[in-house]
Image: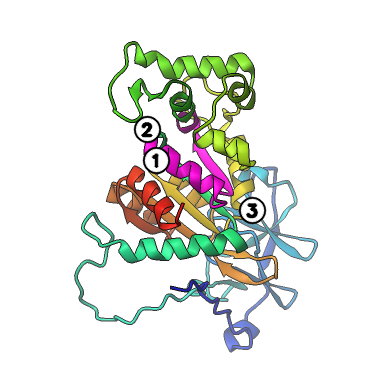
Amino acid sequence: MTFKLTPYDAPDFSEAKFTEAPDAVLKPCPFDKVAPEHYHAMSISPEYFKINGQWLLAEESRMDCVPVYENGKVYIREFRNLKKDDLVICGRTENCEEGIYVHFNGFKEENSFNDQFAFRQNKTRETAFSVDYDNLYELLKHEKEHGKIVWVLGPVVSFDQDCKDAFSKLVAGGYVNALLAGNALATHDLEGSYLHTALGQDIYSQRSMPNGHYNHLDTINRVKYYGSIAKFIEEEHIDNGIIYSCEKYGVPYVLGGSIRDDGPLPPVFGDVYEAQEKMREQIRSATTVISVATMLHSIAVGNMTPSFRIDKYGRIRQVYFYCVDISEFTANKLSDRGSLTSRAIITNAQDFIVNVAKGLGL
């Protein structure tokens, strides 16, 4: 199987609806952090705005943000980052009526079966995912050379020895360019590397260890004693695990904090907006995102990930987003929140990671 990016079908701006469309309306922000009335809110799709007779693409899009015209370009800003007098594009229509065009069907998937009635069209536990895995293997091989692969992991990925080893091989093999997670993933991964437990259970046998409920706290405390994860790894001679591998191979990781966190570890961002900014720094250049067993992080990352990216050659290409979870609810919720292009694989997270590593020959 040879992987090919889904081609982008650009709008034909010579059509009458484009040539006859009015220029988009620009209104200044009345105050910092406040958009003008009738502001336009972004989607995950490519969006074009007619300004001074020219259709401009908002190149770095993000859902639920607003487009700002500045220095001949359209920039996308969160409401909290708006400044007084920023020129915001206004309008609530999407088919050129107000100089705004949302290109929903820019990436057309091949589909040879168009019957209106058909069984098993939704992703569930009963779905056969063999072709999804094969497509993912080929996609990852392509992205290793031509893109940026961002993984979003829940803590369950660190609870199993084989899963930890498999993800470490993905890091070493160049299939992980950034990792987004919470305090728990890093804590239990480091606990496993340090004490061979996760939440006090042996990461291979799953036996509960005496006083094992202290282990994750002891791990956090020891990391804080050294002042950093890197120093902890060095001084405690840690030689395995997900975070260890990220440190070893220079893969950036962003740990977003939670109201539930213990400790937390030193690099965890306790300010949610700071965490969001750091996560978005990695997502801005992501071309494939794989979110595994973490509903809240999946939705958060899904909301900041557009369906497209401008590549280094100036071409518009698709961003691939996978949501992997044992619950159909999580995958469906992601789509309900606007990430309509996400692809679901309903399976055990640990099995998924191990299968992907094996499928890539690692």
- In front: label 2 or label 1: 1
Residue situated in front as seen by the camera: 206 or 20: 206
Q: Which residue is mark 3?
A: 36
Q: Is residue 360 left or right of residue 173?
A: left
Residue situated in front as seen by the camera: 72 or 257: 257
Q: Are discs 3 and 2 less than 8 Å apart at CB?
A: no
Chain part drawn in magenta: 161-186
Q: Are discs 2 and 1 less than 8 Å apart at CB?
A: yes
Q: Main structural element of the magenta stretch: helix, strand or loop?
A: helix
**What is the three-letter code of the residue carrying label 2?**
Phe
Percent across and percent down for residue 206 are 29, 27
Percent across and percent down for residue 171 are 54, 45
Q: Quadrant of the N terminus?
A: bottom left
Q: Secondary structure at mark 3?
A: loop
Q: Which residue is mark 2?
A: 159
The label number, if any, that marks residue 163 in the structure image:
1
| Residue 306 visible in the shown view | yes
Residue situated in front as seen by the camera: 129 or 270: 129
Query: Given the current orientation, which residue lies at the most extreme right position?
Result: 71
Task: Determine which quarter of the picture holds residue 210.
Answer: top left
Q: Secondary structure at mark 2?
A: loop
Percent across and percent down for residue 74 are 70, 62
Task: Determine which quarter of the picture holds residue 11.
Answer: bottom right
**What is the three-letter code of the residue carrying label 3?**
Pro
Q: Is residue 300 left or right of residue 214?
A: right
Neighbour class for label 1 at 10 Å: few (<14), some, many (≥20)?
A: many
> Distance from label 2 to label 1 (Cα)?
8 Å
Q: Is residue 246 above or below residue 223?
A: below
